[in-house]
Image: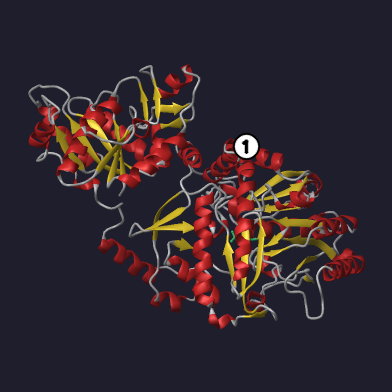
């Protein structure tokens, strides 16, 4: 705990007095207390606090943003033709934090006071990463104001440390004054820190004499809230007893000590103990704008209060219509229809069935095979496993999956023995063309993960291959399916990876980042030509016979719309470019580690391949689990990663800052050094 944000139910409730009282009492207990009033319009609060507490910090640090007129900050600053500078506030807070044990940050008015047209006091508290003390007036009317403030705070993901009452008048206490604290403690489910009585003077002795026994400031110093020790234990026990984890050997799991995540904020996950971990793989490649993004949170909230779910089978709903329109407007050219499902596997499953049925419906019945790349990954349902190339999964389920046509992929790092990149890439292309010439009349579609083959180990496509393959498919009337479940939504630096080579697929599969990592949703986009292959008379029975119960879920669609809104508002892609450069620069250093065989990066997708011998590229045996070991090691230093075999994957949220990226790289570098050293 380094700071606390002091807000109130209204202006004039006594925030500044409360700040003074808390600072005085904490000092009395021997703590070095700093204060801050980040935004002030008119008045002398900051000067008053500085003087009363005899604080030596410069006023510019205590109050970085000042406007003369006593108005709502957004207005006061607008009238001076200025804007509140949040960066400046954060920088000043950063300095104060280093000088003091605790910094009391006094807000301006209440939580919903606008600092700019689209930025409120609550947003500042979130950006400063502070928990709240709510100062409330004692007396009639306070229950409503206080409960509203608590609800608003929680709705915005802010933690409320407690409510502190302030007696603004020197009057006899009636029934409301006597009962308010307990009612609010109960109905608001919050701790009450006490009541600051009416003070005749604000001298130190008077504050200590009147408040020391009735205001509990210990709560301000407690470390950030984790769950109780018994609750932590219980969750671990129940997890082991009841949960079956995906892609996990449960025998190992039962003997390991699992991390249970309870909260998250920005680039960080917090476990039940309250420990913070940098989310280095975007919670398995889904998170885009950080956890608890205020816009996405707000939009999902708004939608929740309108409609949680209604089916797309025979009905429509507002967010799914709006999202379909929006997606077709940003997708590569020609994709004009959106079919919804729930996850990446079903997006691909739908794509395959659409492609197959398209030819059945339009009279080319022999076109029934799906071609795919040898080392691809498209999901875990049987259809998507069938078009996947990961040997292990194929072996286990071989009697359940259908026959496909495998196409070699020109892997730049691991070309077959005796072959060299780039010759090998052209050889693969030639073979692809020969195959298409021979078999196109039997091939319905060709499915790829454009630009980056994610699950295969972050394998990057050589330049130009995607474009050529898509052209060859077009020429031979093979439907080109781009599975951008992993690469979509900015991952490679462009909104969609296909844009990197100006490719417009016939079908595009989206999931993972679609909802910014909030809710399960997928979309399969098709061209009008393919869509028209399903529009016949009812009696022809050429309908697309596919649909999931939660298709087009309004909450998920609202999250996806919010995701795209944030891309626009925060200029996410523009701001990503320098961060991609930073990553590229720092990643070069990894070659200093002798067991790093290959470092692959495209945008915010990174794979660091560890090898036993760099010269021969001899892999570590899989039994040695070097990837897992590295990920265990980074966890000890507050970073979450998940490897793909011997490849360490870095896939940070697009919102991760340069500083956080730096830390992610440092911790990873040291962990690889330690494990392979
Ligand atoms: C993750 C992934 C899938 C599968 O998505 P799920 O939501 O896990 O079913 C499919 N294709 C690609 C390229 C992926 O990365």
Q: Can residue 234 be seen in this view?
A: yes
- Position of residue 556 in the picture relative to residue 329 (left or right): left
Nearest to the observer: residue 351 or residue 116: 116
Question: Ligand 1: does it lie within 8 Å of the C-beta at label 1?
Answer: no
- Position of residue 177 in the picture relative to residue 306 (left or right): left
Quarter-of-image position of residue 51: top left
Q: Is mark 1 on a helix, strand or loop?
A: helix
Using the image, determine if residue 560 lies above or below residue 68: below
Quarter-of-image position of residue 567: top right
Q: Position of residue 357 (x, y in %)?
A: 77, 57
**Total numbered labels placed on residues in the image:** 1
Nearest to the observer: residue 456 or residue 340: 456
Judging from the image, the colouring scheme is secondary structure
Using the image, determine if residue 94 lies above or below residue 661: above
Using the image, determine if residue 12 lies above or below residue 232: above
Residue of label 1? 322
Nearest to the observer: residue 551 or residue 79: 79
Q: Where is residue 571 in the image (x, y as percent from the top left)?
A: 61, 39
- Position of residue 489 in the picture relative to residue 656 (left or right): right
Q: Where is residue 504 in the image (x, y as percent from the top left)?
A: 79, 49
Q: Position of residue 441 (x, y in %)?
A: 89, 64
Q: Is residue 143 visible?
A: no
User: Quadrant holding ligand 1?
Assistant: bottom right
Using the image, determine if residue 47 lies above or below residue 259: above
At x 63% / y 69%, what residue is drawn?
Answer: 591
At x 60% / y 70%, what residue is drawn?
Answer: 592
Quarter-of-image position of residue 133: top left
Nearest to the observer: residue 423 or residue 251: 423
Q: Classify mark 1: residues with Cα within 10 Å, few (<14), some (14-19) or many (20+).
A: few
């Amino acid at each position: 705990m380094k700071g606390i944000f002091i807000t109130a139910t209204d202006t004039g409730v006594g925030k500044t007095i409360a700040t003074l009282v808390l600072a005085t009492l904490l000092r009395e207990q021997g703590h070095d207390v700093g204060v801050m009033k980040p935004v002030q319009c008119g008045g002398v609060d900051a000067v008053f606090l500085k003087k009363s507490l005899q604080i030596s910090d410069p006023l510019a640090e205590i109050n970085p943003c000042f406007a003369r007129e006593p108005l709502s900050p957004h207005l006061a600053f607008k009238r001076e033709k200025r804007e509140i500078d949040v960066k400046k506030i954060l920088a000043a807070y950063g300095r104060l934090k280093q000088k003091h044990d605790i910094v009391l940050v006094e807000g301006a008015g209440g939580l919903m006071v606008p600092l700019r047209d689209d930025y409120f006091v609550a947003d500042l508290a979130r950006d400063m990463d502070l928990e709240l003390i709510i100062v409330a007036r004692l007396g009639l009317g306070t229950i409503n104001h206080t409960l509203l403030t608590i609800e608003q705070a929680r709705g915005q993901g802010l933690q409320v440390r407690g409510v502190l009452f302030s007696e603004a008048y020197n009057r006899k206490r009636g029934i409301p004054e006597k009962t308010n604290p307990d009612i609010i403690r109960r109905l608001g489910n919050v701790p009450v820190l006490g009541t600051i009585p009416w003070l005749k003077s604000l001298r130190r002795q008077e504050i200590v004499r009147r408040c020391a026994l009735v205001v509990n400031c210990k709560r301000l110093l407690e470390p950030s809230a984790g769950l109780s020790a018994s609750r932590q234990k219980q969750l671990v026990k129940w997890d082991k007893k009841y949960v079956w984890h995906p892609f996990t050997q449960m025998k190992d799991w039962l003997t390991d000590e699992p991390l249970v995540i309870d909260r998250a904020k920005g680039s960080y996950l917090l476990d039940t103990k309250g420990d913070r971990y940098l989310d280095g793989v975007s919670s398995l490649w889904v998170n885009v704008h950080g956890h608890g993004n205020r816009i996405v949170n707000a939009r999902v909230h708004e939608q929740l209060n309108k409609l949680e779910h209604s089916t797309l089978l025979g009905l429509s709903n507002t967010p799914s219509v709006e999202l379909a329109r929006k997606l077709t407007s940003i997708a590569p050219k020609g994709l004009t229809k959106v079919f919804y499902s729930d996850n990446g596997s079903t997006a691909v499953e739908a794509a395959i069935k659409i492609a197959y049925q398209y030819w059945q419906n339009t009279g080319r019945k022999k076109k029934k095979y799906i071609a795919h790349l040898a080392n691809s990954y498209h999901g875990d349902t049987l259809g998507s496993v069938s078009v996947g190339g990961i040997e292990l999964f194929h072996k286990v389920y071989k009697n359940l999956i259908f026959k496909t046509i495998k196409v070699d992929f020109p892997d730049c790092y691991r070309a077959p023995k005796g072959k060299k990149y780039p010759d090998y890439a052209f050889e693969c292309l030639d073979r692809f063309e020969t195959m298409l010439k021979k078999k196109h009349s039997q091939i319905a579609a060709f499915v790829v993960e454009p630009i980056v083959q994610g699950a295969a180990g972050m394998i990057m496509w050589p330049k130009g291959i995607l474009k050529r393959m898509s052209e060859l498919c077009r020429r031979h009337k093979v439907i080109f399916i781009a599975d951008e479940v992993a690469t979509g939504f900015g991952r490679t630096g462009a909104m969609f990876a296909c844009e990197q080579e100006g490719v417009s697929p016939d079908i595009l599969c989206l999931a993972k980042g679609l909802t910014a990592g909030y809710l399960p949703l997928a979309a399969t986009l098709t061209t009008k030509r393919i869509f028209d292959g399903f529009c016949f008379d009812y009696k022809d029975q050429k309908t697309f016979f596919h649909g999931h119960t939660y298709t087009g879920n309004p909450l998920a669609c609202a999250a996806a719309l919010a995701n795209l809104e944030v891309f626009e508002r925060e200029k996410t892609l523009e701001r990503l470019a320098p961060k991609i450069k930073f990553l590229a620069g720092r990643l070069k250093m990894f070659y200093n580690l002798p067991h790093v065989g290959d470092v692959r990066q495209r945008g915010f997708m990174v794979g660091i391949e560890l090898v036993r011998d760099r010269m021969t590229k001899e892999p570590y045996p899989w039994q040695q689990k070097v990837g897992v070991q590295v990920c265990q090691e980074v966890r000890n230093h507050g970073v979450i990663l998940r490897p793909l075999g011997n490849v360490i994957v870095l896939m940070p949220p697009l919102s991760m800052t340069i500083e956080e990226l730096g830390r992610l790289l440092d911790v990873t570098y040291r962990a690889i050094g330690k494990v392979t050293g």
